[in-house]
Image (tube, grey):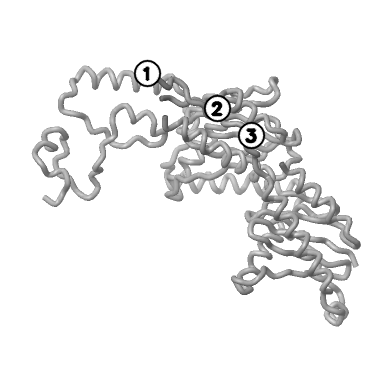
Amino acid sequence: MGCCFSSDEDKVETNIQNPNERTPLLYPQPGEQQNQGGRSGPIYSQQNQTGDEQSEFTRILRQTAINVIDVTSTESHNIEQGDMQDRATQYSNRLNMVLQGSGKSRVYRPNLPTGITSPQMTLAAAPISISDVQLITSVSEKLANAAREIKIQHKESLVVTFGVP
Amino acid sequence: MSLMCTSSGLLFRLRIRHSDNTKLKSLLNSEGSLLAFSGFPDKDASAAGAIASNIWTSFQKSGQYSLDDGKLNCVLVECKLGKIAITKVANLLLCLCAKETVSYGMLKTKIEAMAAYLEEPLSQVASS
Amino acid sequence: MERTLEMQLEESIHNPGITGVLCVDNNGLCLGAKGSAPLKACGSISALAGQAAKLANPNGPTPVICLESEHGIVLIKKTDKLTTALFKSS
């Protein structure tokens, strides 16, 4: 079969009928499902699991789902295409209304020195002096060293062992 | 043998003097419950923790969904009255709330420094 | 912690002619500023330094960028994790 799980014992234990390249080699234990935080993977139920356990599990899940207010799940990922366009138009209309009202221009201008009126003057001037180059080099070196010092000094151990026989 | 984090040591670490610009530092587990915090007692740390954890999870989900990348590194939030940085340390979240005068670069450098410091002891505790 | 950085910024602004110092990280986020440095220029400075570093020899020292205008110059230099800008009046 070309799969690590083709032995007979494994077939008995798991109910995976057709193992392929997407079949995980390690199955998450039921207890570990809780720890994954994100999306839960498919649950591979053991054959010896009774129906009672399953129904109890679904009951607990349903109860938890009722109790928990999950803000992150309120964002709907599957909006209809037309709905999406309607919303986009609505938002841009609102945005334009606010922008026109405030009189702010949305033209982006980096806050660097503005252009010069007489380029020939600046171009004819002496190039940047060697002292300026040395100044910026030394200042940047010093600042880089200072920035490297932003770390926490180790003073005492955070972790202690206990229960050592 | 078991390992535990000395709570006094952790609190002491969290209370490191950040020139008093950082208002609140907290350590949360992935469900948003507070494990440790340091800051002014009038701030509702557990609510802030839950919100921070929610923001983190929300961003991580979006990243996984739209960018196919669940490796969220750092979240910086600008609010009206301050700035917030959230990052992951071992299997926990570290949240830093700062005044609005603190620059983003400094906030990010600090939270990275704290995360790097706490990473090793916290992963020791997590794996034990 | 960041006291050293503050001190270095304070020290560098006392050089003759310097009106502002700006310290930016590799993401274009401001780490510290002193004097009349425009905080909005953080991103531009980091981006400029990054572009210039691509032109220079990768094994040599990082280039010094000088923006000249009628009122003064801006000197920019990038180190491995930090970009520094000095605003100098002429």
Chain ID of residue with mark 1 = A
* Residues at marks 3 and 1, CA–CA distance in whole angstroms: 47 Å
User: Would you place residue B94 above or below residue A19 in this image?
Assistant: above
Chain ID of residue with mark 2 = B
| Residue drawn at x 56%, y 30% as measured from the top left | A158
Q: Nearer the viewer, residue A91 or A130?
A: A130
* Residues at marks 2 and 3, CA–CA distance in whole angstroms: 31 Å
Classify residue B61 as left or right of residue B39. left
State the SS at label 3.
loop
* Mark 2 closeness class: few <14, some 14–19, many ≥20 residues within 10 Å: some
Q: Which residue is mark 2?
A: B50
Question: Image quadrant for the C terminus of chain C?
Answer: bottom right
| Residue drawn at x 35%, y 21% as measured from the top left | A62
Q: Which residue is mark 1?
A: A63
State yes or no: discs 2 and 3 in contact (Cβ < 8 Å): no
Q: Which residue is mark 3?
A: A155
Classify residue A27 as left or right of residue B58. left
The image quadrant of residue B12 is: top right
Closer to the N terminus: mark 3 or mark 1? 1
